[in-house]
Image: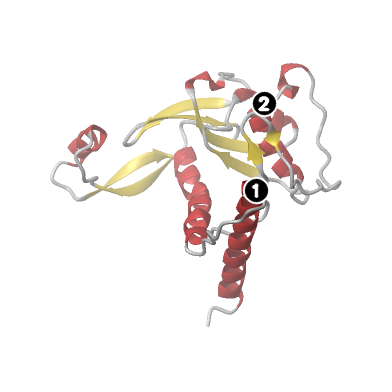
Amino acid sequence: SGYCIRWLWHVHGKGPYALVPQAQSARPARQTTGKLAQLTPTQQVVTTLISLLPAATYHVFLDNLFSSLRLFSTLQKQQVSASGTCRKDSGIDKILVNRFTWKDNALVLFLSIVFQSSQEVIRGRRRPAGDAAAKKAARQVFGLDVRKDFSVPRAIDEYNHKMNGIDLDDQMRSYYQYSHPTRRGGWQSIAWNFLREVVVVNSFLLQLWGSPR
């Protein structure tokens, strides 16, 4: 829906960085040992954000920047479900994590500790336009039809719907950008602009849901 509940600053290679809210004690992180506890700084962003949420049952969706066997196994030990696209070096474990591939316009690798590759749903797709090689190949299965129904892995379908919230947030924040320069350092400007945009978008959505007229 585009509503931002929690945010976290991240510096590449350093994990959560500055302006980090205090994690709530209601969700204590379980201790892990061995390789599973050795999360990269980028992966620690995910576990830190989850620790800021109220205690509940969660299913997080991630893109391939964060997804890995180590992170998913750690989340499973913390009783947090996870699904997301991954890279070739994300790791394979048939017992703890399901991994499968799916090709729409491009080949997608996927990790999940929730969905099975055999779970599918029927979704209507529109014949893609454009001259890209992938789109030309995708058009072949449509024949003369403009729209066609396809069996889609449920994991991919859920991922597409759940990850849209991030895209909507980015889109709505772009409408209220504040790009005035500041002489006090770039990070202050970035922090101020981001938080201002989040407040404006969240306020708009709360007003829309509470009193749409």
> Horizontal placement of 60 versus 167: left or right?
right
Mark 2 falls on what kind of element? loop
Residue beneath label 1, please?
Answer: 185
Please name the residue shown 50% across and 54% down the image: 170
Q: Position of residue 184 (x, y in %)?
A: 67, 52
Q: Indicate how the structure is coloured in the image.
A: secondary structure
Q: Position of residue 118 (x, y in %)?
A: 46, 32
Please name the residue shown 68% across and 31% down the image: 14
Q: Quadrant of residue 4?
A: bottom right
- Looking at the image, how many numbered discs can be counted on the residues? 2
Please name the residue shown 39% across and 40% down the image: 152
Q: Nearer the viewer, mark 2 or mark 1?
A: 1
The correct choice, above or below, for 130 with respect to 207 in the image is above
10 Å crowding of disc 1: few (<14), some (14-19), many (20+): few
What's under tag 1, amino acid-wise? Gly
Q: Earlier in the sequence, mark 2 or mark 1?
A: 2
Residue at the top extreme? 34
Instruction: Name the one closer to the observer, 128 or 197.
Output: 197
Please name the residue shown 67% across and 37% down the image: 45
Instruction: Name the one closer to the observer, 96 or 177.
Output: 177
Residue at the right extreme? 25
Instruction: Name the one closer to the observer, 143 or 47.
Output: 47
What's under tag 2, amino acid-wise? Thr
Marking on residue 24: none
10 Å crowding of disc 2: few (<14), some (14-19), many (20+): some
Residue at the front extreme? 183
Q: Position of residue 28 (x, y in %)?
A: 84, 40
The correct choice, above or below, for 33 with respect to 188 in the image is above
Residue beneath label 2, please?
Answer: 40
The correct choice, above or below, for 78 with respect to 25 in the image is above
Mark 1 falls on what kind of element? loop
CA gap between label 2 and label 1 equals: 28 Å
